[in-house]
Image (spheres, coloured by chain):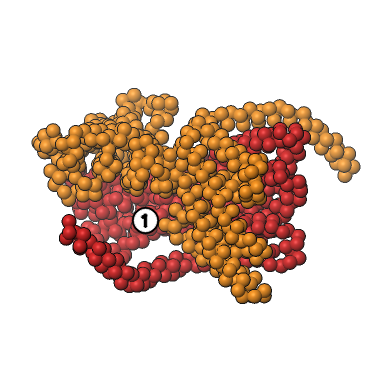
Chain colours: A red, B orange
Amino acid sequence: MEIISHEKPPGLFARMWLYLKSLPEKSKANVVEVVNKVIKLGKDDPRRITHSIKVGLALTMVSIFYYYQPLYDNFGVSAMWAVMTVVVVFEFSVGATLGKGLNRGLATLVAGGLGVGAHHLASLSGEIGEPILLGFFVFIQAAASTFIRFFPTIKARYDYGLLIFILTFSLISVSGFRDDEILELAHKRLSTVIIGGSACIIISILICPVWAGQDLHNLIATNLEKLGKFLEGFGNEYFKTLEDGESSNKDEKSFMQEYKSALNSKSSEESLANFARWEPGHGRFQFRHPWQRYLKIGNLTRQCAYRIDALNGYLNTEIQAAPEIKSKIQEACTEMSLESGRALKELTLAIKKTSQQPITSADTHIKNAKSAAKNLNTLLKSGIWEDCDLLTVVPVATVASLLIDVVNCTEKVAESAYELASAANFESIDSAISTEKPRSGQCGAEKSNADCPHVVITVSELTPAAAMADRSLKA
Amino acid sequence: MEIISHEKPPGLFARMWLYLKSLPEKSKANVVEVVNKVIKLGKDDPRRITHSIKVGLALTMVSIFYYYQPLYDNFGVSAMWAVMTVVVVFEFSVGATLGKGLNRGLATLVAGGLGVGAHHLASLSGEIGEPILLGFFVFIQAAASTFIRFFPTIKARYDYGLLIFILTFSLISVSGFRDDEILELAHKRLSTVIIGGSACIIISILICPVWAGQDLHNLIATNLEKLGKFLEGFGNEYFKTLEDGESSNKDEKSFMQEYKSALNSKSSEESLANFARWEPGHGRFQFRHPWQRYLKIGNLTRQCAYRIDALNGYLNTEIQAAPEIKSKIQEACTEMSLESGRALKELTLAIKKTSQQPITSADTHIKNAKSAAKNLNTLLKSGIWEDCDLLTVVPVATVASLLIDVVNCTEKVAESAYELASAANFESIDSAISTEKPRSGQCGAEKSNADCPHVVITVSELTPAAAMADRSLKA
């Protein structure tokens, strides 16, 4: 007991002393780490820095209401609402800011009006009835609005508006119980909200604007490009292991893993599309640009990415197919993978440049990929593998089959890219072709080739002759 | 010209009249449609209705501050902050409400303190310097906090806290310019925020609580179950087309498409896990339940779902393999699919019941699936297909290969379910086994069977004898 009680305090103090002594070094290391993280965050997307500065600017501007006497005389303490609006409404992209600002403004207007009405109605019912009736109104509207927020379509676009509706209605109707100048309160609240919201919208549009539409456009194009990169590299990577006996080093391979970010981009695509709807025309995009079509391309891209994820599994699996089997289908598979990759890259280019030209080149690549698939079919029919062990054929056959799937996916992506190009009036090659081109949505597999020159031949009907004929149709 | 001007006004009026006449019918149809939607929304998840009522209740409770004179004398107009807190903080699940409430309370405390400090500092610098210095402070903190919100880890947990920090700091420091009773303002704001937040938290916990943790738990289990259902049905569905000549009707098939919701559940899983962290112990879950391990299971489930999506493509593809080829591997493939499906269903049960018992049964099913894979290998080696056209072999080979992938995925899911069971102290079969069982994270492919009785045999080393030996190890 004595030893313990004798040793403990110095132990504790010693440890504390050691801890305190190591603190400067530790905190220095921590500070360096944090600073590095901050620099990386800023470098990854410099718009984050400008956004932060813009928020600071908007807040400082709005707080002038407090400092400048004539303005303060007008609004008084209500100027607080302007500050609050800026903090809550200012979002990263113009679309999100506009959406929130309009939601807030409109909700404040409607809820303010209804709140004044509810107050008026309640005040008719005498001193005892008033709080009861007000409480009832608040309860009913809060419960109803909260329930409405569960509707998925409303949640996507008007969630914030309903929140502000509940807030303003409660504040106005309940404040009215004490404050007789309720109309003035509602009016001041509305005008300060409008001032704060306008400050946000103006600053977010005028100073280095971040357009959600542009981001969506880039995200879709980048995801397609990543898949294209994988496919361009896949043939070499899969068959190289057989030639060199070992796979290439990690640095070269990293671009092969980029496609993974496309697997889970659904939710960010959807929120960007929701924001983009609020945005006015900017750059190459008009108001009411067909953002929904980007989501369709995104969904098809993900379909393709799932197949690619399965393909990727065959790059690193231990169960490798025998080299002699691989070599027999190497040419056809490499061609399919390479050509679909090129097609996806052309589609990326088409989207990035908002031009129809690359879609035509993509069609050529898709046709090449399909004739490679055709060749593969012929190869398989010729029975080149008859002396091989079927067990070793399975992985190779799977890869071939997945590649055929990928070619089909690529074609669907090309179709939807074409629909987007028509709907969004991408720059066409020449006006003669552009007047002939089918309207969006009419171009499906059931249409004849003459109606839809850019798509349609299925693997089974594609022969070199048909491909030639199809090419001549286009020229 | 005359005809047009003569005809147009009646046409317009007639159309308006027709429109007005059809309005009651149309609006009746619309009302019926909306009512049906509301009923469906409520039926799908009745907790939505209770949540709406809870929000109404909390708001009405808090507005008592306005109605009841003694309370109003204490807080005055600041009572508004309590109303605002309730509207903004009350979320669907307890975890989200707690997270937002704590974030708001803490941020108000810290920002209030700093705001008072900033005000004091600025007031030292004279009448002209004060607004300039205040503006500078507001700018700096708003820009810095906005930038910090971009850190992914901070965004996930403290985003709302930082928003409130910016808000409160700006309000307190700027209001201080006019209001001399700044300390009282800060104090009132903090206490009303605490009152509003507590009302939310108490109501959300006491009245029909919705636990994010429980939801995450159920979501993970349900996703596993959906994959299990698909796999159990896949064998029959894929080989039935050959026996009956036509596929079964749509109603029976709908459960085969349920797995699709598992493909895109990543973001909802992550947000549920973030909310769950804030929750105190409830039901079978303790505070600091290993929620992160659910995310790991979720990720592996998605890996499996990608393969299943590829498999699903072979159910409806036009390029069907020849029946005689299918029939040769039917038994092994059906067995693999069925047994992995059963294993996933057992794992679902293990999670749903928080019991280790079903994991053991899942192991048995996985072993069966593996021995089926082994049989398939033997079949393929025996060269049963030698006289077949290789072209028709490709789809069947792909299905077989994807099923092998699925079996491997299932095993990984079982491993991570086992890790979860150990970390979360799931009910074990008997204490003798539970004391012997390995600790979570130590159980990988590199361990010997004796250490990890529940996993590990790879396809290559699995022989019926080994399986027997392994089973006897467990008993």
Q: Is residue A39 above or below residue A113?
A: below
Residue B392 screen position, x and y as percent:
29, 38
Q: Is residue B390 above or below residue B171?
A: above
| Residue at 88% across, 39% down | B6
Residue A38 screen position, x and y as percent:
44, 67
| Residue at 67% across, 64% down | B178
Q: Is residue A223 left or right of residue A318?
A: right
Identify which amino acid the numbered label 1 is placed on. Answer: Leu
Residue with the mark numbered 1: A231
Residue B368 screen position, x and y as percent:
20, 34
| Residue at 45% across, 68% down | A43
In this view, which residue lies farthest toward the front?
Answer: A2
Nearest to the observer: residue A215 or residue A385: A215
Chain of the residue on which disc 1 is drawn: A
Quarter of the figure that contains the N terminus of chain B:
top right
| Residue at 34% across, 24% down | B244
Nearest to the observer: residue B345 or residue B137: B137
Q: Is residue B179 above or below residue B379?
A: below
Q: Is residue A356 left or right of residue B252?
A: right
Which of the 4 quarters of the picture holds residue A92?
Answer: bottom right
Q: Is residue B386 visible to the viewer in this orientation of the structure?
A: no
Q: Is residue B438 visible to the viewer in this orientation of the structure?
A: yes
Nearest to the observer: residue B424 or residue A226: B424
In this view, which residue lies farthest toward the top?
Answer: B244
Residue A235 screen position, x and y as percent:
31, 56
